[in-house]
Image (spheres, grey):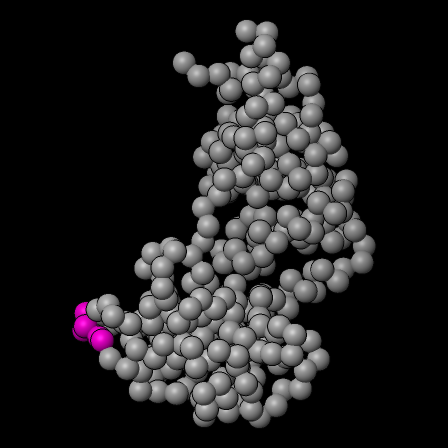
Amino acid sequence: MDLKRRYLPVFVVAFLASGLRAELLPYWPVHWMCAEADGIVVGERIGANLVKVEEWLLPPTKGEPAGPKIEIVALDDHSRMIGAGRLVREDDGTVVHRPLRSRRLVCFLERKGVGWYSLSPGGSGSSGMVWIETDRCYRYQQLIDPGPYILAPDPNSSSEKVLREQIATGLADRRAWEKALEIVRPEEKAVVLASYLLTRTSPEEDRGTYLRRIRQVLPQLGTDAVVEVIALLREAQPGDDVTEAVMVLCDLGRQARPAVDLLLELLEQPEQVHPVRVLEALGRIEDASVAPRILPFLEHD
């Protein structure tokens, strides 16, 4: 039992730190692409890789001119066959398997060197390319991963109007995030960034685009971050998922020792955060005094 008490927590934390996580399919939500894009363009394909620009919804963010035409590298590699060998159904159940008739598009762009690319390319399609035909949006999707992209009606953007509304929301979220990053005073910055950790308090509500990005910036604020995350956890309500807040404390490591008592309480609240995440955070904090209280969660019948 002595060996178990001494080494089992170490093994558990090491295993959790390895972080086996399921990968998302590269069919990205519009809000996510708004956060990642170096430009968003509406236009019409007029050549193999050439697009006549109707509107820049997001002008180039890296200083390039927002010209009337744009060349999108590998645009001609995108399949224009709806279904691409598979039967695809419209929302009304109609089976579709035919070439796309429209050249109208909305493209979420990524700048690589001197070239423009559609976001998240993969073989015969990309997540960043949206075709518009009779006001219906078609996107490249994966039925299995790994697997080829299939051009099909977008279940999340039923029309160009809906897509534009989603883009407007995504760009507003992006501006709010960029404004938060520009805050100079660490205490104030920690308050704003910590608000993203809960859906109930987040400026982006339940979209979650910036939730994962929090872990890249909030721990850099050190003790100011600890203070705000503790305050957030103390004010958490039933139904709040506090997983990301706990993971920020995990990233803060020993600096998060003032949060130990709260973390121990959360071990008894699996509806708010899985106990293994709490154990991971406690392991990174390295407070030996918690060992007797966490041992029951490490033992199995």
What residue is at 48 percent from the left and 43 percent from the top? 21
What residue is at 45 percent from the left and 46 percent from the top? 22
| Left or right relative to 289: residue 142 | left
Image: magenta residue range:
93-97
Where is residue 189 drawn, in percent x and y? 74, 54
Residue 210 on the magenta span:
no
Of the 4 image quadrants, the one containing the N terminus is top right
Of the 4 image quadrants, the one containing the C terminus is top left
| Left or right relative to 87: residue 278 | right
| Left or right relative to 232: residue 185 | right
Where is residue 229 drawn, in percent x and y? 66, 41
Q: Nearer the viewer, residue 246 or 154?
A: 154
What residue is at 29 percent from the left and 75 percent from the top? 82
Where is residue 259 drawn, in percent x and y? 67, 31
Quarter-of-image position of residue 162: bottom left
Q: Nearer the viewer, residue 179 or 135?
A: 135
| Left or right relative to 165: residue 247 | right
The answer to whether residue 201 is seen in the rendering is no
Q: Give the main secondary structure of the magenta stretch.
A: loop
Decide: is 248 above or below 179: above
